[in-house]
Image (tube, rainbow, N blue to C red):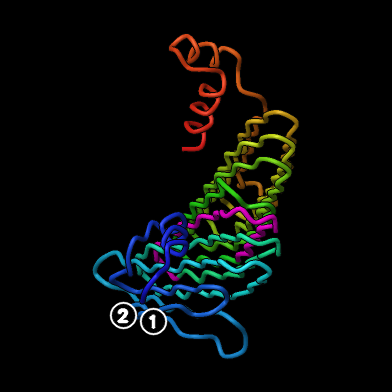
Amino acid sequence: MVFDEIQKNLLKEVAGLEEVPNGAFNIRSNGELLGRTSTSSIEIVNKKDKPGIDIYIKKTDKKQRVDLPVIITKAGLKDLVYNDFYVEDGADVLIVAGCGIHTVDNGDSSHDGIHSFHVGKNAKVTYYEKHYGGGDGNGKRTLNPTTEIFIDEGGSLTMDTAQIKGVDSSIRKTRAILQDRATLVIKEKIMTHGTQYAETDFNVQLNGEDSAVHVVSRSVAKDSSVQKFYSVLDGNTKCSGRTECDAIVMDNAKVMALPGLNANDINASLVHEAAIGKIAGEQLIKLMTLGLSEKEAEEQIVNGFLK
């Protein structure tokens, strides 16, 4: 498998890959399969009725890894893919995904990834996903991920997502159902500029006793960009849930946060925290006294905030 320079850059940006992975992987480029390898414990197969893949992850004695990046280098391409993960009871796996779009023409390009996670009993899943846009084309780069999560008794899923550069429009929808003692942790980082638009929409059903969810969103909105954050936690039994939305607003940008907490059981414990505002003046002054310009000071604060 040979990558050109643009493909290499995209793979490094979204998945940290500088060469073909050693283990299980599936690389999708411009709507088609570029390369794939399954292992004895991770099987990747094509869907029969629609574009996409099924990933079957078996229990082993150690943590496993599978890489599933998507890259787009053609303007005017609208890519749609369905990926379903089936994680066996007791398995422990790291999934590194993400999508990068690089265009040099004027046509709009998009990738809609529709995913489902079926996490078995006492299984542990860590999922990293990064969205990135590059190139000097005037066409829009759009990424719309939709995720459904089903976590069985004692299972856990940690999702770490980032969208820091170049994506003109993104709408992320995540739905989750948790059984007894299941845990879900979602961490997202977003930065928008220009006239970009980013929306995230979380809904978590805490159906099992002692299930727990923690959603953390950190974002920076610059120029005239717009961000919207929706989160709804339904506590349907003895459970705990927490959402946090922290955002920095700069220039003429707008950020909206709409939390929803529904305690449908007397033993449901649900919390939401939100903080939206500009960079504090004393932070800028402190850094500028160390010799930084105002712009450099702002960049330092933003970079630290999104770490």
Q: Is residue 261 visible in the rendered structure shown here?
A: no
Residue 139 located within the stretch drawn in magenta:
yes
In the image, residue 69 above or below residue 286: below
Instruction: Residue at the far left: name it.
Output: 61
Count neighbours of disc 1 (C-alpha within 10 A) and say few if under 14, some if 14 to 19, many if 20 or more.
some
Task: Give the residue pinned by disc 2.
Answer: 39
Badge 2 amino acid:
Thr
Q: Position of residue 102 (x, y in %)?
A: 56, 60
| The N terminus sits in image quarter | bottom left
Q: Secondary structure at mark 1?
A: strand
Badge 1 amino acid:
Glu
Residue 223 located within the stretch drawn in magenta:
no
Task: Give the residue pinned by disc 1.
Answer: 43
Q: CA distance from mark 1 to mark 2?
A: 6 Å
Residue drawn at point x = 45 percent, y = 78 percent: 34
Residue drawn at point x = 54 percent, y = 74 percent: 83
Q: Are marks 1 and 2 in contact (CB under 8 Å)?
A: yes
Tell whether 201 sits left or right of 187. right
In the image, residue 265 above or below residue 223: below
